Image: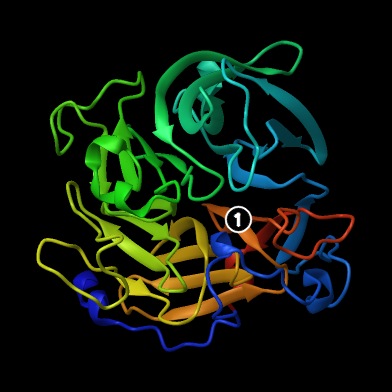
Amino acid sequence: MKYLLIMVLIAVSVACSSTGPEESGSEPMQEDAAEANGGETEQAEEGEPVEVIAEQLEVPWAIAKSGETIFVTERNGSIVTIEEGQEERADVVLEHEVLAEGEGGLLGFVLSPDYAEDGRAFVYHTYEEDNEILNRIAVISQSEDGQWIEEEELLAGIPGGTIHNGGRLALGPDEKLYATTGDAGIEELAQEREAMAGTILRLELDGTVPEDNPWEDSYVYSYGHRNPQGLAWDGAGTLYSSEHGSNAHDEINLIEPGANYGWPIVRGDETEEGLSAPLIHSGEDTWAPSGVAIAGDVLYVAGLRGEGIYALNLETAEFTTWLEGYGRIRDLFVDGQSLYFMTNNRDGRGVSQDSDDYVIKVDLEQQER
């Protein structure tokens, strides 16, 4: 059933511009997100589906949760801990300084599966070495004074640039660490597996190459991607990823190990032998999709240029705008009956107000009534 989605061309209006994806120099949105939602975003009344968890975040990128504690990375190199309504911002001390230029900075973040015991987390960040912009993955832990300190480097030398750094980290149901990388603005790199650009990487938690990866001694799990920024698995263990297209044609892909997703050879409905087509794409519209999360049979997609959250029913292929009015959405995750999302209106491509950016909690059951 899922493979029938390949034939779907999205015809639904998603309330977004068709002038190109967010990473290709798009114009800022023309309407304040809070005004579009009826004014300053505030805590919802009891029984309403939306609740503000945190505000005044500084260009946040990734969000994670342990128990009742939420963690948010900020591209300038900080991690914000949100607990019992209080926000604490801490520096991240790394062997290579975070380079927060363009679309780079402190990006992906995921907690260790044993975080409650070891206090460790994984981060993906941009840095500069020998006048070259690169990305790396490292293990960090929090010290007694609140700083996050690097413990070890897992992987370095991932191509980077002022655009197309990928950056999403996720732990798979197979207990492996997955990372998305962009083409670093050099399209042809996405077809060069050894470059680790325009790929989804798969690592053991100690940084070694899994023995069952598609290619021996290679971290590459799939390639031919332009700028993927979302990873999520359904209950059957199927991996999905979101990807920024070129001049629209954003994609949602079902990821198979060893598959080539065609960038820059094909886009949209174009096909060629040996290349994998997207499940769906945005056609001439632009979503600029970032983080994704799955609840049941629904894949939720954060839209940056699309300024909303989309919902893709993985069984019926129905694709709809699920929530809008908060501006650019960078990341989201589902915890039980709650969906948490994070705005990104202060990244230089949105229109912000003094209280941006937010973490907001949505009750799935009430929102969908």
Q: Identify which amino acid the numbered label 1 is placed on.
A: Arg
Q: Quadrant of the C terminus?
A: bottom right
Q: Residues within 10 Å of mark 1 (few under 14, many from 20)?
A: many
Q: Quadrant of the N terminus?
A: bottom left
The residue closer to the viewer here, 36 or 125, is 125
- Indicate left or right for 277 with 103 as reference: left
Residue holding disc 1: 330
Q: Is residue 203 above or below residue 334?
A: above
Seen at 49% across and 80% down, the residue is 285
Label 1: element kind: strand
Q: Position of residue 211 (x, y in %)?
A: 16, 26
Residue 75 location, quadrant = top right
| Residue that lies at the very extreme toward the front in this rendered image | 131
Q: Nearer the viewer, residue 44 or 330?
A: 330
**Scheme of image coloration:** rainbow
Image coordinates of residue 53 in percent, x first then y, are 76, 50
Q: Position of residue 323 (x, y in %)?
A: 62, 73
Q: Look at the image and tell me whether residue 339 can be seen.
A: no
283 relative to 180, above or below:
below
Foreground of the two, 135 or 171: 135
Where 41 falls versus 260 (above or below)?
below
- Quarter of the image holding residue 298? bottom left
Q: Residue at x 81, y 64 (%)?
A: 46
Horizontal side of 108 relative to 177 (left or right) equals right
Could one spot residue 342 in this view of the protein?
A: yes
Q: Is residue 346 above or below residue 6?
A: above
Q: Position of residue 72 (x, y in %)?
A: 66, 39
> In the rendered picture of this protein, how many numbered marks are placed on residues?
1
Which residue is rendered at x = 73% and y = 59% of the image?
Answer: 345
